[in-house]
Amino acid sequence: MRSGEVDTAAQKLVNQVRSSLHVTVNPRYGVLKNGTVTEEDKKAYIEAWSQPGALTGGLNYYRAAAAGPPRPGETASPLTAQPLMVRVPTLVIWGEKDTALLTGNLNGLDQYVTKLTVRRIPDATHWVVREKSAEVNRAIREFLSQ
């Protein structure tokens, strides 16, 4: 992506975020639907994300991740588990109603994370920390006490 394209993509993202924060009953945005984000929260998000450069870190994450299919004429490089291994105890807390990151992403994760604990929260979405903060905190405390 060229610089101008990145700026345009960033502006589109800001506009989408603004739009989604103004919609309070959209089922795609569970956190907004069930009222865990207040009007004050929405204003704070919009203000923070509207600042110059506020989304740069997030966009750079996706740029660096090289996620997605290969470009025309390129072939996908095979990944091997060895250089990607995580060898420290790791807790993954997953909202099973997440429509952005589906539970299938957990399949095979244990091949890359040798000390993996997965806590699935059936009635939570992508916003699991906001929706189920007590359950998330309990899971973290239990994990850390092991």
Image (spheres, grey):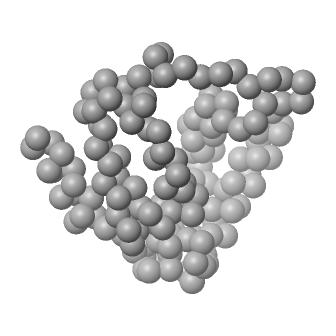
Q: Nearer the viewer, residue 128 or 109?
A: 109
Measuring 11% from the left and 41% from the top, which residue is drawn there?
146
* Count of labels in the image: 0
Q: Is residue 106 at least partly visible in the picture?
A: yes
Q: Nearer the viewer, residue 127 or 11?
A: 127
View extreme (top): residue: 83
Measuring 63% from the left and 37% from the top, which residue is drawn there?
62
Measuring 57% from the left and 63% from the top, which residue is drawn there?
99
Locate residue 89, reporting x and y percent.
25, 33
Locate residue 65, reporting x and y percent.
61, 31
Locate residue 10, reporting x and y percent.
71, 47
Name which quarter of the figure residue 76 lies in: top right
Q: Is residue 111 left or right of residue 23?
A: left
Q: Is residue 120 left or right of residue 18?
A: left
Name which quarter of the figure residue 130 lies in: bottom left
Taking 79 as reference, is 44 above or below it? below
View extreme (bottom): residue: 25
Measuring 57% from the left and 83% from the top, which residue is drawn there?
25
View extreme (left): residue: 145
Q: Nearer the viewer, residue 51 or 15?
A: 15
Taking 19 as reference, is 87 above or below it? above
Q: Is residue 47 at least partly visible in the picture?
A: no
Q: Quadrant of the N terminus?
A: top right
Q: Nearer the viewer, residue 93 or 37?
A: 93
Name which quarter of the figure residue 121 lies in: bottom left
Locate residue 69, reporting x and y percent.
76, 36
